[in-house]
Amino acid sequence: MREELKYITFNTDMGWVGILGSAIGLMSVTLPQRSAQEAHQLLGDSLDYATWSPHRFDDLVERLKVYFSGHKVTFPDKLDLSRATPFQRQVWGITRLIPYGETRSYAWVAEQIGNPRGVRAVGQALGRNPLPIIVPCHRVITSEGKLGGYSGGIGMKRELLHLEASASIR
């Protein structure tokens, strides 16, 4: 298993970020943290079986640095969602379609997956998203326009939405 999992932590304009991936694709990305150690910890127990790989993620590292400096970036990266439920994969797949600088409601996501009454389940699936930014769950808000929840905290969600809105204006 050690050969399959690779990771890196690196600094951005907003803080330290960690990435964990397998031969299949990305498994986990952390939101910016105050230290490399915090980003490292958030990647979880899988790091016990992972190898530091500073060059494996070069392109993604560069795109995340550009993103966190306030510029529009896309993340078409392959994902390894083998630890997710089919429902989570469906929710995250729809969420990846939300354009940079735009928002959609939890109800919109639920409708897109054919389960309009599953708004709470959508919120729970987004709360378990191991790939924030790559699967841009910060772009999902309530039908009333409120931010709703966010695993990185409401302040981080607000900051990411502001970052994208500012970049969209440039």
Image (cartoon, rainbow, N blue to C red):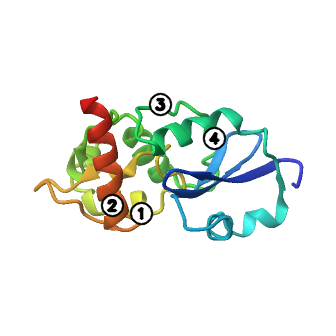
Q: Quadrant of the C terminus?
A: top left
- Mark 3 to mark 2: distance in Å? 23 Å
- Mark 3 to mark 4: distance in Å? 12 Å
Label 3 is placed on what type of residue?
A: Thr
Which residue is nearer to you in this view: 139 or 53? 53
Q: Quadrant of residue 2?
A: bottom right
Label 4 is placed on what type of residue?
A: Val
- Mark 4 to mark 2: distance in Å? 28 Å
Q: Percent from the top left, x then y, of residue 104?
A: 24, 44
- Mark 1 to mark 4: distance in Å? 23 Å
- On screen, residue 71 above or below 119: above
Residue drawn at x 41%, y 46% is 136
Q: Mark 4 or mark 2: which comes first in sequence? A: 4
Closer to the camera: disc 3 or disc 4? Answer: 4
Query: Counting other residues with Cα less than 10 Å from the Cα at mark 4, is it few (<14), some (14-19), or many (20 or more)?
Result: many
Do residues under tags 1 and 2 come within 8 Å of each other at their CB atoms? yes
Which residue is nearer to you in this view: 110 or 79? 79
Please give the residue where the numbered disc 4 appears in the rendered image.
61
Closer to the camera: disc 3 or disc 2? Answer: 3
Please give the residue where the numbered disc 2 appears in the rendered image.
123
Q: Mark 3 or mark 4: which comes first in sequence? A: 4
Please give the residue where the numbered disc 3 appears in the rendered image.
74
Closer to the camera: disc 4 or disc 2? Answer: 4
- On screen, residue 67 above or below 11: above
Q: Quadrant of residue 54?
A: top right
Q: Percent from the top left, x then y, of residue 149?
A: 31, 66
